[in-house]
Image (tube, rainbow, N blue to C red):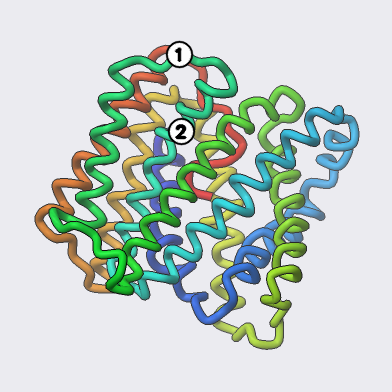
Amino acid sequence: MGGLLICLSAIAWGLDGVVLTPRLYQLPVPFVVLLLHAVPFAIMLPLMRGSWKALGAMERRGWWVLALVSLTGGLVGTLAIVKALFLVNFDQLSVVVLLQKLQPLFAISMAAALLKERITRRFLGWAAAALGGAYLLAFGLAVPDVTAGDNTIAAATLALIAAAAFGSATVFGKQLLGSLDFRDATFGRYGMTAVMALGYTLVSGAGLPFAEVTATEWIIVLVISLTTGSGALFLYYYGLTRVKASVAAICELSLPLSAVVFDYLVNRSVLGGWQWVGAALLIGAILRITTAVSGRDSQPTDDVESSHR
Protein backbone atom coordinates (compact mmCIF):
# COMPACT_ATOMS: atom_id res chain seq x y z
CA MET A 1 0.00 0.00 0.00
CA GLY A 2 2.84 2.39 0.82
CA GLY A 3 4.50 1.84 -2.54
CA LEU A 4 1.18 2.21 -4.35
CA LEU A 5 0.47 5.55 -2.65
CA ILE A 6 3.90 6.87 -3.60
CA CYS A 7 3.36 5.77 -7.20
CA LEU A 8 -0.01 7.53 -7.26
CA SER A 9 1.57 10.70 -5.85
CA ALA A 10 4.34 10.63 -8.44
CA ILE A 11 1.83 10.11 -11.25
CA ALA A 12 -0.19 13.04 -9.90
CA TRP A 13 2.92 15.26 -10.01
CA GLY A 14 3.58 14.17 -13.57
CA LEU A 15 0.00 15.07 -14.47
CA ASP A 16 0.37 18.44 -12.77
CA GLY A 17 3.58 19.38 -14.59
CA VAL A 18 2.33 18.41 -18.04
CA VAL A 19 -1.44 18.88 -17.98
CA LEU A 20 -2.61 21.15 -15.15
CA THR A 21 -0.17 23.95 -14.22
CA PRO A 22 0.69 24.85 -17.86
CA ARG A 23 -3.03 25.64 -18.40
CA LEU A 24 -2.62 28.64 -16.10
CA TYR A 25 -0.10 30.28 -18.45
CA GLN A 26 -2.29 33.33 -19.07
CA LEU A 27 -1.91 34.40 -15.43
CA PRO A 28 1.22 36.11 -13.99
CA VAL A 29 3.68 33.56 -12.61
CA PRO A 30 3.92 35.12 -9.10
CA PHE A 31 0.11 35.18 -8.87
CA VAL A 32 -0.06 31.51 -9.89
CA VAL A 33 2.44 30.60 -7.17
CA LEU A 34 0.33 32.54 -4.66
CA LEU A 35 -2.83 30.68 -5.68
CA LEU A 36 -1.10 27.28 -5.55
CA HIS A 37 -0.20 27.88 -1.91
CA ALA A 38 -2.96 30.11 -0.57
CA VAL A 39 -5.83 27.91 -1.76
CA PRO A 40 -4.45 24.65 -0.24
CA PHE A 41 -3.67 26.52 2.99
CA ALA A 42 -7.22 27.87 3.12
CA ILE A 43 -8.50 24.30 2.74
CA MET A 44 -6.20 23.07 5.54
CA LEU A 45 -7.22 25.82 8.00
CA PRO A 46 -10.50 24.30 9.25
CA LEU A 47 -9.11 20.75 9.07
CA MET A 48 -5.79 21.21 10.88
CA ARG A 49 -6.48 23.76 13.61
CA GLY A 50 -4.37 21.73 16.01
CA SER A 51 -1.28 22.60 13.97
CA TRP A 52 -1.38 26.16 15.29
CA LYS A 53 -0.58 24.82 18.76
CA ALA A 54 2.42 22.88 17.47
CA LEU A 55 3.69 25.93 15.59
CA GLY A 56 3.20 28.15 18.62
CA ALA A 57 5.31 25.84 20.76
CA MET A 58 8.17 25.81 18.26
CA GLU A 59 11.44 27.50 19.22
CA ARG A 60 12.93 30.42 17.30
CA ARG A 61 15.41 28.18 15.46
CA GLY A 62 12.51 26.07 14.18
CA TRP A 63 10.84 29.18 12.76
CA TRP A 64 14.04 30.14 10.92
CA VAL A 65 14.27 26.67 9.40
CA LEU A 66 10.59 26.77 8.44
CA ALA A 67 11.24 30.12 6.73
CA LEU A 68 14.14 28.59 4.77
CA VAL A 69 11.99 25.62 3.70
CA SER A 70 9.19 27.96 2.63
CA LEU A 71 11.58 30.25 0.75
CA THR A 72 13.50 27.55 -1.14
CA GLY A 73 11.04 24.74 -1.73
CA GLY A 74 7.94 26.90 -1.62
CA LEU A 75 8.59 30.28 -3.23
CA VAL A 76 11.81 29.99 -5.27
CA GLY A 77 11.33 26.38 -6.39
CA THR A 78 7.72 26.83 -7.44
CA LEU A 79 8.40 30.16 -9.16
CA ALA A 80 11.21 28.57 -11.18
CA ILE A 81 9.35 25.43 -12.23
CA VAL A 82 6.11 27.26 -13.10
CA LYS A 83 8.02 29.80 -15.21
CA ALA A 84 9.92 26.96 -16.93
CA LEU A 85 6.67 25.17 -17.77
CA PHE A 86 5.20 28.38 -19.18
CA LEU A 87 8.28 29.14 -21.30
CA VAL A 88 8.16 25.94 -23.36
CA ASN A 89 4.62 26.71 -24.54
CA PHE A 90 3.38 23.09 -24.38
CA ASP A 91 6.41 21.88 -26.38
CA GLN A 92 7.90 18.82 -24.64
CA LEU A 93 6.81 19.71 -21.13
CA SER A 94 8.11 16.32 -20.04
CA VAL A 95 11.68 17.57 -20.60
CA VAL A 96 11.23 20.24 -17.92
CA VAL A 97 9.72 17.69 -15.52
CA LEU A 98 12.56 15.23 -16.15
CA LEU A 99 15.23 17.89 -15.58
CA GLN A 100 13.69 18.54 -12.18
CA LYS A 101 14.63 14.96 -11.24
CA LEU A 102 18.16 16.28 -10.59
CA GLN A 103 16.82 17.30 -7.17
CA PRO A 104 18.54 14.43 -5.26
CA LEU A 105 21.90 15.54 -6.65
CA PHE A 106 21.47 18.99 -5.13
CA ALA A 107 19.98 17.61 -1.91
CA ILE A 108 22.99 15.36 -1.28
CA SER A 109 25.40 18.18 -2.12
CA MET A 110 23.60 20.50 0.31
CA ALA A 111 23.62 17.80 2.98
CA ALA A 112 27.39 17.54 2.58
CA ALA A 113 27.79 21.31 2.93
CA LEU A 114 25.38 21.88 5.82
CA LEU A 115 25.08 18.53 7.59
CA LYS A 116 28.67 17.40 6.94
CA GLU A 117 27.54 14.20 5.23
CA ARG A 118 30.27 12.43 3.27
CA ILE A 119 30.32 12.57 -0.54
CA THR A 120 32.06 9.66 -2.25
CA ARG A 121 33.83 9.44 -5.57
CA ARG A 122 31.09 7.10 -6.72
CA PHE A 123 28.51 9.81 -6.06
CA LEU A 124 30.54 12.32 -8.07
CA GLY A 125 30.70 9.85 -10.97
CA TRP A 126 26.95 9.25 -10.98
CA ALA A 127 26.34 12.98 -10.58
CA ALA A 128 28.40 13.64 -13.70
CA ALA A 129 26.40 10.96 -15.52
CA ALA A 130 23.13 12.58 -14.41
CA LEU A 131 24.26 15.99 -15.65
CA GLY A 132 25.32 14.46 -18.95
CA GLY A 133 21.92 12.84 -19.30
CA ALA A 134 20.22 16.14 -18.48
CA TYR A 135 22.19 17.86 -21.24
CA LEU A 136 21.26 15.21 -23.82
CA LEU A 137 17.64 15.43 -22.72
CA ALA A 138 17.50 19.20 -23.17
CA PHE A 139 19.76 19.73 -26.19
CA GLY A 140 20.64 16.33 -27.70
CA LEU A 141 24.05 16.47 -29.39
CA ALA A 142 23.61 20.11 -30.41
CA VAL A 143 25.49 23.02 -28.88
CA PRO A 144 22.93 25.44 -27.39
CA ASP A 145 22.84 28.79 -29.16
CA VAL A 146 22.35 31.50 -26.56
CA THR A 147 21.73 34.13 -29.26
CA ALA A 148 18.90 32.29 -31.00
CA GLY A 149 16.18 33.54 -28.66
CA ASP A 150 15.06 29.97 -27.98
CA ASN A 151 13.30 29.45 -24.65
CA THR A 152 14.85 25.99 -24.24
CA ILE A 153 17.96 27.31 -22.47
CA ALA A 154 15.94 29.54 -20.14
CA ALA A 155 13.48 26.73 -19.34
CA ALA A 156 16.30 24.23 -18.69
CA THR A 157 18.08 26.73 -16.43
CA LEU A 158 14.90 27.41 -14.46
CA ALA A 159 14.26 23.66 -14.10
CA LEU A 160 17.76 23.28 -12.64
CA ILE A 161 17.12 26.20 -10.27
CA ALA A 162 13.90 24.48 -9.18
CA ALA A 163 15.78 21.22 -8.59
CA ALA A 164 18.39 23.06 -6.51
CA ALA A 165 15.68 24.86 -4.52
CA PHE A 166 13.72 21.67 -3.80
CA GLY A 167 16.96 19.88 -2.94
CA SER A 168 17.83 22.61 -0.44
CA ALA A 169 14.35 22.39 1.04
CA THR A 170 14.83 18.66 1.59
CA VAL A 171 17.91 19.31 3.73
CA PHE A 172 16.28 22.15 5.67
CA GLY A 173 13.19 19.98 6.06
CA LYS A 174 15.19 17.24 7.78
CA GLN A 175 16.21 19.84 10.36
CA LEU A 176 12.65 21.16 10.72
CA LEU A 177 11.25 17.74 11.57
CA GLY A 178 13.19 17.89 14.80
CA SER A 179 10.54 20.40 15.90
CA LEU A 180 7.38 19.34 14.02
CA ASP A 181 5.80 16.22 12.59
CA PHE A 182 5.25 16.19 8.83
CA ARG A 183 1.57 17.21 9.05
CA ASP A 184 2.26 20.35 11.09
CA ALA A 185 5.36 21.10 9.01
CA THR A 186 3.40 20.87 5.76
CA PHE A 187 0.68 23.11 7.21
CA GLY A 188 3.26 25.68 8.31
CA ARG A 189 5.16 25.52 5.02
CA TYR A 190 2.06 26.20 2.92
CA GLY A 191 0.99 29.05 5.19
CA MET A 192 4.37 30.78 5.29
CA THR A 193 4.92 30.31 1.56
CA ALA A 194 1.51 31.86 0.88
CA VAL A 195 2.55 34.95 2.88
CA MET A 196 5.90 35.12 1.06
CA ALA A 197 4.21 34.68 -2.32
CA LEU A 198 1.73 37.46 -1.50
CA GLY A 199 4.58 39.83 -0.67
CA TYR A 200 6.54 38.88 -3.79
CA THR A 201 3.47 39.24 -6.01
CA LEU A 202 2.82 42.76 -4.74
CA VAL A 203 6.48 43.84 -4.93
CA SER A 204 6.97 42.37 -8.43
CA GLY A 205 4.09 44.42 -9.80
CA ALA A 206 2.15 41.35 -10.91
CA GLY A 207 -0.79 42.52 -8.84
CA LEU A 208 -3.70 40.40 -7.67
CA PRO A 209 -5.84 39.90 -10.80
CA PHE A 210 -8.52 37.75 -9.18
CA ALA A 211 -11.13 39.16 -11.56
CA GLU A 212 -9.14 37.84 -14.55
CA VAL A 213 -9.16 34.23 -13.33
CA THR A 214 -11.65 32.28 -15.41
CA ALA A 215 -13.95 29.61 -14.04
CA THR A 216 -11.84 26.95 -15.76
CA GLU A 217 -8.66 28.29 -14.16
CA TRP A 218 -10.28 28.30 -10.72
CA ILE A 219 -11.24 24.66 -11.25
CA ILE A 220 -7.64 23.82 -12.23
CA VAL A 221 -6.30 25.58 -9.12
CA LEU A 222 -8.79 23.71 -6.94
CA VAL A 223 -7.94 20.37 -8.56
CA ILE A 224 -4.21 21.01 -8.02
CA SER A 225 -4.86 21.99 -4.41
CA LEU A 226 -6.82 18.84 -3.63
CA THR A 227 -4.84 16.35 -5.71
CA THR A 228 -1.42 17.13 -7.15
CA GLY A 229 -0.57 19.76 -4.52
CA SER A 230 -1.14 19.19 -0.82
CA GLY A 231 -3.26 16.09 -1.48
CA ALA A 232 -0.44 14.25 -3.25
CA LEU A 233 2.05 15.44 -0.63
CA PHE A 234 0.02 13.90 2.20
CA LEU A 235 -0.32 10.63 0.27
CA TYR A 236 3.42 10.66 -0.38
CA TYR A 237 4.31 11.03 3.31
CA TYR A 238 1.70 8.46 4.36
CA GLY A 239 3.29 6.02 1.92
CA LEU A 240 6.79 6.83 3.20
CA THR A 241 5.84 5.67 6.68
CA ARG A 242 5.33 2.16 5.25
CA VAL A 243 8.27 1.65 2.88
CA LYS A 244 12.01 2.20 2.90
CA ALA A 245 13.44 5.20 1.11
CA SER A 246 15.12 2.90 -1.42
CA VAL A 247 11.72 1.45 -2.37
CA ALA A 248 10.26 4.95 -2.52
CA ALA A 249 13.01 5.99 -4.94
CA ILE A 250 11.95 3.26 -7.36
CA CYS A 251 8.27 4.12 -6.95
CA GLU A 252 9.03 7.76 -7.73
CA LEU A 253 10.11 6.72 -11.23
CA SER A 254 6.38 6.88 -11.92
CA LEU A 255 6.87 10.67 -12.15
CA PRO A 256 9.13 10.90 -15.22
CA LEU A 257 7.43 7.94 -16.89
CA SER A 258 3.97 9.46 -16.39
CA ALA A 259 5.22 12.86 -17.60
CA VAL A 260 6.39 11.36 -20.89
CA VAL A 261 3.10 9.45 -21.31
CA PHE A 262 0.91 12.47 -20.47
CA ASP A 263 2.97 14.72 -22.74
CA TYR A 264 2.36 12.32 -25.62
CA LEU A 265 -1.32 11.70 -24.91
CA VAL A 266 -2.24 15.35 -24.30
CA ASN A 267 0.26 17.33 -26.39
CA ARG A 268 1.39 14.70 -28.93
CA SER A 269 4.98 15.48 -27.93
CA VAL A 270 7.55 12.72 -28.51
CA LEU A 271 11.16 12.65 -27.33
CA GLY A 272 13.88 12.34 -29.96
CA GLY A 273 16.45 9.55 -30.08
CA TRP A 274 19.20 11.26 -28.09
CA GLN A 275 16.60 12.64 -25.67
CA TRP A 276 15.58 9.08 -24.86
CA VAL A 277 19.23 8.23 -24.23
CA GLY A 278 19.55 11.28 -21.99
CA ALA A 279 16.34 10.46 -20.11
CA ALA A 280 17.50 6.87 -19.48
CA LEU A 281 20.92 8.07 -18.33
CA LEU A 282 19.40 10.73 -16.06
CA ILE A 283 16.83 8.42 -14.45
CA GLY A 284 19.33 5.59 -14.04
CA ALA A 285 21.95 7.83 -12.43
CA ILE A 286 19.47 9.50 -10.06
CA LEU A 287 18.01 6.12 -9.11
CA ARG A 288 21.51 4.80 -8.40
CA ILE A 289 22.38 7.87 -6.31
CA THR A 290 19.14 7.75 -4.33
CA THR A 291 19.19 4.02 -3.60
CA ALA A 292 22.87 4.14 -2.63
CA VAL A 293 22.19 6.88 -0.10
CA SER A 294 19.02 5.12 1.11
CA GLY A 295 20.98 1.95 1.63
CA ARG A 296 23.11 3.74 4.23
CA ASP A 297 19.98 4.94 6.03
CA SER A 298 17.18 2.45 6.49
CA GLN A 299 14.80 5.08 7.89
CA PRO A 300 12.17 6.60 5.58
CA THR A 301 12.99 9.96 4.08
CA ASP A 302 11.67 12.73 6.34
CA ASP A 303 11.85 15.78 4.11
CA VAL A 304 9.12 18.36 4.46
CA GLU A 305 9.32 19.44 0.86
CA SER A 306 8.77 16.83 -1.76
CA SER A 307 11.05 16.72 -4.73
CA HIS A 308 8.22 18.08 -6.88
CA ARG A 309 6.47 20.80 -4.97
Q: Is 248 placed left or right of 218 in the picture?
A: left
Local crowd size for mark 2, using a 10 Å CA cut-off: few (<14), some (14–19), many (≥20): many
Which image quarter holds the N terminus? Answer: top left
Report the disc number at residue 253: none
Secondary structure under tag 1 reads loop
Residue 118's disc is 1
Callouts 1 and 2 close, C-beta under 8 Å: no
Disc 1 marks which amino acid? Arg
Please give the name of the residue rendered at 49% of the width and 65% of the height, measured from the top-left corner.
83
Say which residue appears at 34% left-offset and 73% top-offset. Answer: 90
- Residue 209 vertical position relative to residue 308 in the rendered view, above or below: below
Q: Secondary structure at mark 2?
A: helix
Q: Is residue 227 left or right of residue 56?
A: left
> In the shown orientation, is residue 42 left or right of residue 173?
right
| Residue 298 x %, y % | 46, 14
- Whether 241 is drawn above or below 83: the answer is above
- In the displayed image of the protein, which residue is found farthest to the front? 147
> Label 1 to label 2, Cα distance in Å?
29 Å
Three-letter residue code for mark 2: Gly
